[in-house]
Amino acid sequence: MSEVSDIVRAYYAAYQAKDRSAIEALVGDDFSFSSPYDDHIDRTLYFQKCWPNSKHHDRFRIEKLFVRGNEAFVRYELRLNSGVTFRNTEFLRLEAGKIKEVEVYFGNQQGSVQKPE
């Protein structure tokens, strides 16, 4: 598996399947993860802090995937086990066939945005 889009899709599929060993095989040793709650945490802290949240995730549906070179932007819809859905956008950078960096940009829970009157 060497295509960036294949690796990115495998990452989300493994997350949905709660397959930690598959995720571990996809992210590099020097992996870095950032989100509004995390500032460039390393691989070890990612698996300690973020991975346990996968138990709340029911389904990822990739809506948009843009690849340029070794980088990708993904917009996905995530449905939680509770039935709540929301969209996030993520920027991923790969190196040597492994995910080196993920930056998460949180979206709004569907139905939570108030329309101006």
Image (cartoon, rainbow, N blue to C red):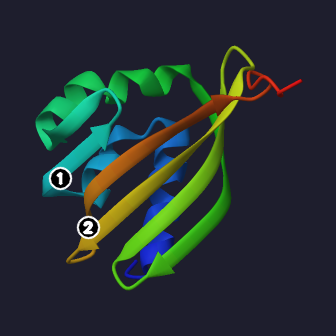
Rendered position, 75 above or below 105: below
Which quarter of the rendering shows the N terminus? bottom left
| Residue 74, percent from left and from top | 54, 59
Q: Residues within 10 Å of mark 2 (few under 14, many from 20)?
A: many
Q: Residue at x 69, y 14 (%)?
A: 82
The reply, left or right, for residue 72 in relation to residue 35 is right
- Say which residue label 2 marks: 98
What secondary structure is found at the residue carrying circle 1?
strand
Hey, what amino acid is under mark 2?
Lys
Q: Quadrant of residue 34?
A: top left
What secondary structure is found at the residue carrying circle 2?
strand
Q: Residue at x 46, y 28 (%)?
A: 54
Which quarter of the rendering shows the C terminus? top right
Q: CA distance from mark 2 to mark 1?
A: 9 Å
| Residue 88, percent from left and from top | 56, 42
Callout 2–callout 1 Cβ contact below 8 Å: yes
In the rendered image, the residue lying farthest to the front is 117
- Say which residue label 1 marks: 31
